[in-house]
Amino acid sequence: MTDLSMANKAGTAAFDVEAIRRDFPILDQQINGKPLVYLDNGASSQKPIAVLDAMDRYYREMHSNVHRGAHTLGDRATSAFEGAREKVRAFLNADSTREIIWTRGTTEAINVVANGLARRLKPGDEILVSHMEHHANIVPWQMVAERTGAKVVPVQVTPQGELDLDSFNSLLGDRTRVLALTHVSNVLGTVNPIAPLIERAKAHGVITVIDGAQAVPHFQPDVQALGCDFYVFSSHKMFGPTGVGVLYGKAQLLEEIPPFQGGGEMIERVSFERTTWNVLPYKFEAGTPPVAEAIGLGAAIDYVASLDRKGMEAAEAALLTRANELVATVPGMEVIGTASNKMPVMSFKIAGLHPSDIGTLLDQQGIAIRTGHHCAMPLMDFYGVPGTARASFAFYNTLEEVEQLFTALQKIQRLFA
């Protein structure tokens, strides 16, 4: 038995990766004549059969618009749809389903919050973000700042890719009104220490908005323990369908801020003189909601909950550990982001090679990664690179796939040496 096989045996004794992979039919295929090695989970994760079946069952057995329906199909759809909301509430440990708003994804959720908070901002106010934010947690705040005269202020990061706490402490002050921070960096994999940062921000009366898109596929956040005012994430990054996301917000704040869109469902009463808003959470859910997609997300939450959480986290940590061990086998390879606490994400460059060339050549060997600026141009500027190649792992990846990635990178490096 090889060392690698022994490692797999030890690492999967309580977490059967091969059995889990059978739950994800898309993984069982060939790309360019090679078995698919899917390492682009940070962009979008794959979907288990349980999610596919839940959405198929909805369309086959209960498709109808939700709420207000006076027939059986409408009742079935509403029950499943609101049941999914309860699953999200429990997953986040929110106080009530009133605090769980369906959106199209993380981006829309942040836009809802940013626009809702605009009326609180005035010239001279400051919105703290970090240098490692996704554009979705920068651009909406810039748009609001332009309208209100507020200013977006970036917290620096260290060369290792960790939040610079000295920078944070120096910037947080009397002018700070909002702290918008990623829980986990999509480029670096860095896990930010958001709980103590939220506590510091609350002492200044600052509203906190946490982007959890890259966190929820790997661990379960507790919004009450964190103490954040808003927490957002996307379904498709945590093994659910595209087209739906979640905005958690404290009920008091959601009551105060205006809705982002107008239309049906989000109203209480409409007249030509005045319109009044529906109760939470429907106040923010104009139009027909993503019923099938919400049900799919609920199924994804159930699926992840059925797994051995500690085993899953250990398996993902083993993937990153092995990848770090193999970096030295590729001449000229440099990892961008070496935080001490990070999720299984590896952004890298190889001397003399453009990231897009690396991605194309890996695809020819059946390996899917992401290349480019990863919607984090300010971070790329900080590191002085136009972009990186990024391998992002999930619990259904194997140590053999890590080995395949680095064997392929070694071939590519030799080819262009």
Image (spheres, rainbow, N blue to C red):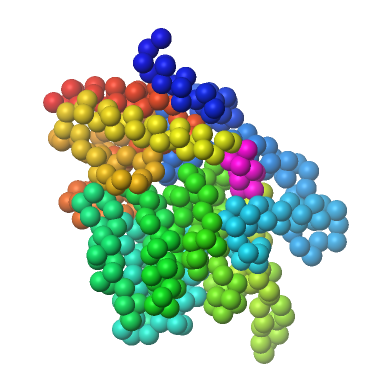
Q: Nearer the viewer, residue 28 or 398?
A: 398
**354 shown above or below 384:** above
Q: Position of residue 214 (x, y in %)?
A: 44, 49
Q: For residue 300, which quarter of the picture?
A: top right
**144 shown above or below 97:** below
Q: Position of residue 48 (x, y in %)?
A: 59, 35
Q: For residue 79, which quarter of the picture?
A: bottom right
Q: Nearer the viewer, residue 352 or 226?
A: 226
**Residue at 40 percent of width and 36 percent of height:** 317
Q: Is residue 212 in view?
A: yes
Q: Is residue 281 left or right of residue 330?
A: right
Q: Nearer the viewer, residue 316 or 360?
A: 316
Q: Nearer the viewer, residue 273 or 68?
A: 68
**Residue at 51 percent of width and 53 percent of height:** 221
Magenta highlight: main SS: helix
**Residue at 24 percent of width and 31 percent of height:** 327
Q: In the picture, which quadrant includes the C terminus?
A: top left
Q: Is residue 302 inside the magenta stretch? A: yes
**Residue at 54 percent of width and 39 percent of height:** 309
**Magenta segment boundaries in residue numbering:** 297-306
Q: Position of residue 5 (x, y in %)?
A: 42, 16
Q: Is residue 367 left or right of residue 53?
A: left
Q: Is residue 247 inside the magenta stretch? A: no
Q: Which residue extends farthest bottom?
A: 273
